[in-house]
């Protein structure tokens, strides 16, 4: 009984119809009824597509108006008490207010969904009694059945994961908290069973993190209770993104099937099945098609993997499926107009479903039935592998010669003296993080230039005028270290990707990031190589206008890597090295052009940390190596900066220290300086700028607030190492707010200096 299945389909539509509908509704341009109708049409179209692809178990209830964690929270009546709510099904209006805030109440917090770039809304438990306000899975099951005759597989976020992602309960009360939700889950399952639903997918991705023995015990209780509640319902306990931490326990749970990720598990699941076997009476839902990446599957390889899995399982109780929900990949390659060699080697959601059907057909009818498709997949991939884009021999030789242990030639103390001599900065120097407001006008001009409505020269003149204007503003403000303002950049990865070899940009390759916001990650398909200077012209121009140092501004290798879809024929470490090597050339080019402060931003280091601690070291080693490869070849007078948009460094401080940057700027104002201790004098001996005000809010801070933040930091940090800067780049703020806030910041810095 081989079956094909899907775990979740992208919500956004081929042309982001979902996003548009939502935003029209938010603006008041369409009624709730219209929104409901439009999203229903889209949902049915998506179901129909999956049916046509031949998928046996089609997920229902994976759709969301914003986020599936928020859906689960509101289904259980968990509306934060700052929002009005009178019980019953949570109105759509209220649902959106929790996600987006309203005039009197702030939105609920948003966090990254495991190690993906999708963000979920953090449930706030404990303020209202858990109650079942609607049975969402049942609703969507009925909808699919009535409209299309599809026997859907409802998807439900499991109790352990739901609660672990939430806040508002004490860890030592985890058992009680779970117990307060279990009857609601049981009720949902009972109703589904009564309806005649056959399968349900319960997602517990939390089980691939560092789960404690106590949490495994709780998991056992959960699934025993649910089994008793609805004994006829076939529950597939679904995990993804990594290997489950306790294989023997998970296969002993009283569920019909276990869903495992065979792509991101480092080979652990197959090894576990081979070692411990797989229970005869259970179904293995085998996630063998990568749900996180965009590459076409090598069907020959997956056929081989499947054969091994079959042999180890010893039965036909196997479901073939993607490794995770397809939420994390774009919808279809079909409409893309890109290099054909790349195009045929890509596979987005629709193409992945086709691969799943093909493999399922193969195991049912024999390999010969799908040999043609296997051959095509192998050919498409070999062609791309053999292409010149992946075989840049000159680069490979250069990379072979690159140092294994890149280090600055002088230690930090010597560098600090040399740099002080070169720049003669005052104590507590003031600076900003890089970008200045990207006004409507800036975006409009860029669009006109992209469309060919203005010439390159006209566009450059425009950018130069912006730079000049902001250099003057920085002079007036009395800042000590300037930036050029990043007006020529839309996005910190795209800008570099467009100038380096090896990147491909799609037209419709969007994926949901949070709410209606979608991102279009570049695709690293070939060897990443330096083509020409990327930032020199703008930086040199800015520097020509002032005697104050202007920081060159680059995006770091790990951030470029983590915010792209990355080729999978070589290791991520290798790709990181290629990116780093290109950045090294840019750093050297800037230095040759007399830019002596260079900032290499790495906002994504922390978010890319693997889910399990045991895998952190190789990841951080790669991060440190590539950062140092890019930044350490400069002279001792050249000052390397970095910026990271968070402040919780406790567990990675050694890696941060190992970057050996001269100055790091980090966010702190929103965490109220809780983490300053991590950088206390004894442990951290390099320059450090703590964000002294929050740039995410339009409010201009008061001098007292900023002074307080500075003084707080100086209680712990050496004033000679301390820099004063905002939390992050200023591109989302307007001119008035920006100037207002920086004025206050400079003033606060001057006053504090006098007191020292
Ligand atoms: N230099 C970038 C800017 O100022 C940094 C952005 C970021 O850290 N996300 O916009
Ligand atoms: Zn930032």
Image: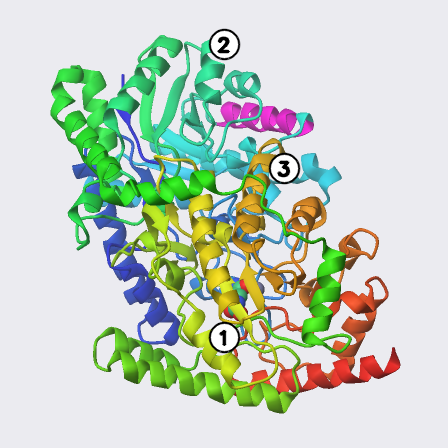
Residue 567 in view:
yes
Q: Nearer the viewer, residue 594 or 232?
A: 594
The Cα–Cα distance between marks 1 and 2, rounded to whole angstroms, is: 54 Å
Camera-nearest residue between 99 and 665: 665
Q: CA distance from mark 3 to mark 2?
A: 32 Å
- Foreground pick, 347 / 596: 596
Query: In the rendering, which numbered label is found on residue 275?
Result: 2
Magenta: predominant secondary structure element?
helix
Q: Residue at x 41, y 44 (%)?
A: 398
Q: Position of residue 552 (x, y in %)?
A: 52, 69
Q: Residue at x 61, y 36 (%)?
A: 617
Is the C-beta of the residue carrying label 2 under 8 Å from the nearest atom of ligand 1? no
Q: Which residues are magenta?
A: 214-229
Label 1 vs 2, first from the N-terminus? 2
Disc 3 under 8 Å from ligand 2? The reply is no
How many C-alpha atoms fall within 10 Å of the one at disc 3: few (<14), some, or many (≥20)?
Answer: some
Q: Is residue 297 above or below residue 77?
A: above
């Amino acid at each position: 009984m081989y079956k094909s299945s899907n775990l979740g389909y992208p919500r956004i539509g081929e042309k982001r119809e979902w996003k548009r509908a939502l935003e029209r509704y938010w603006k008041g341009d369409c009624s709730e009824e219209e929104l409901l109708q439009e999203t229903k049409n889209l949902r049915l179209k998506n179901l129909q597509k999956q049916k046509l692809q031949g998928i046996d178990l089609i997920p229902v209830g994976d759709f969301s108006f914003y986020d599936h964690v928020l859906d689960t929270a509101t289904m259980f009546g968990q509306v934060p008490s700052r929002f009005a709510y009178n019980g019953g099904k949570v109105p759509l209006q209220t649902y959106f207010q929790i996600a987006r805030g309203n005039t009197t109440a702030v939105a609920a917090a948003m966090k990254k969904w495991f190690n993906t770039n999708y963000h979920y809304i953090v449930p706030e438990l404990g303020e209202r009694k858990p109650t079942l306000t609607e049975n969402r899975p049942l609703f969507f099951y009925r909808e699919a059945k009535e409209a299309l005759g599809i026997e859907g597989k409802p998807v439900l976020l499991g109790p352990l994961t739901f609660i672990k992602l939430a806040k508002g309960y004490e860890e030592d009360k985890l058992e009680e908290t779970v117990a307060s939700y279990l009857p609601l889950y049981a009720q949902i399952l009972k109703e589904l069973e009564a309806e005649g639903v056959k399968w349900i997918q319960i997602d517990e991705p939390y089980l691939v993190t560092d789960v404690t023995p106590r949490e495994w015990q709780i998991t056992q209780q959960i699934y025993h209770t649910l089994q008793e509640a609805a004994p006829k319902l076939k529950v597939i306990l679904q995990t993804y993104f990594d290997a489950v931490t306790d294989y023997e326990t998970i296969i002993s749970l009283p569920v019909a099937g276990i869903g495992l990720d065979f792509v991101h598990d480092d080979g652990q699941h197959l090894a576990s099945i081979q070692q411990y076997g797989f229970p005869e009476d259970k179904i293995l839902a085998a996630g063998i098609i990568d749900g996180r990446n965009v590459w076409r599957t090598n069907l020959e390889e997956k056929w081989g993997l499947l054969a091994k899995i079959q042999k180890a399982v010893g039965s036909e109780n196997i479901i073939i499926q993607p490794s995770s929900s397809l939420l994390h990949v774009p919808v279809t390659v079909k409409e893309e107009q890109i290099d054909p060699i790349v195009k045929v080697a890509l596979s987005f959601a629709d193409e992945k479903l086709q691969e799943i059907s093909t493999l399922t057909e193969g195991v049912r009818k024999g390999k010969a039935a799908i040999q043609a498709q296997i051959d095509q997949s192998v050919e498409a991939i070999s062609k791309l592998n053999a292409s010149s884009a992946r075989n840049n021999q000159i680069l490979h030789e250069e990379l072979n010669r690159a140092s294994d242990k890149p280090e600055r030639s002088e230690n930090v103390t010597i560098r600090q003296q040399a740099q002080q001599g070169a720049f003669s900065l005052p104590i507590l120097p003031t600076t900003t993080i890089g970008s200045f407001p990207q006004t409507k006008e800036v975006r409009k001009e860029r669009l006109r230039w992209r469309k060919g409505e203005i010439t390159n020269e006209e566009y450059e003149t425009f950018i130069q005028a912006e730079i000049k204007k902001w250099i003057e503003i920085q002079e007036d403000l009395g800042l000590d270290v300037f930036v050029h303002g990043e007006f020529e950049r839309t996005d910190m990865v795209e800008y570099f990707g467009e100038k380096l070899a090896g990147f491909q940009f799609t037209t419709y390759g969007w994926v949901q990031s949070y709410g209606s916001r979608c991102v279009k990650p570049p695709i690293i398909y070939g060897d990443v190589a330096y083509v020409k200077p990327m930032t020199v012209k703008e930086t040199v121009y800015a520097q020509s206008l002032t005697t104050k140092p202007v920081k060159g501004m680059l995006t770091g290798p790990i951030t470029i890597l983590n915010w792209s879809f990355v080729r999978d024929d070589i290791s991520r470490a290798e790709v990181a090295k290629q990116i780093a090597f290109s950045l090294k050339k840019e750093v050297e080019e800037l230095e040759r052009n007399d830019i002596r402060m260079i900032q290499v931003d790495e906002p994504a280091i922390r978010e890319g940390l693997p889910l399990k601690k045991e895998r952190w070291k190789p990841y951080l080693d790669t991060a440190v190596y590539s950062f140092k490869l890019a930044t350490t070849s400069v002279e001792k007078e050249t000052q390397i900066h970095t910026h990271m948009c968070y402040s919780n460094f406790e567990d990675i401080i050694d890696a941060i220290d190992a970057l050996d940057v001269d100055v790091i700027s980090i966010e702190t104002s929103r965490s109220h300086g809780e983490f300053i201790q991590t950088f206390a004098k004894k442990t951290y001996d390099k320059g450090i700028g703590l964000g002294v005000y929050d740039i995410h809010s339009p409010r201009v801070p008061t001098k007292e607030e900023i002074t307080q933040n500075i003084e707080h930091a100086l209680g712990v940090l050496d004033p000679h190492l301390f820099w004063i800067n905002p939390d992050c780049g200023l591109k989302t703020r307007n001119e008035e707010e920006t100037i207002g806030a920086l004025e206050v910041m400079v003033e606060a810095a001057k006053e504090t200096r006098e007191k020292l």
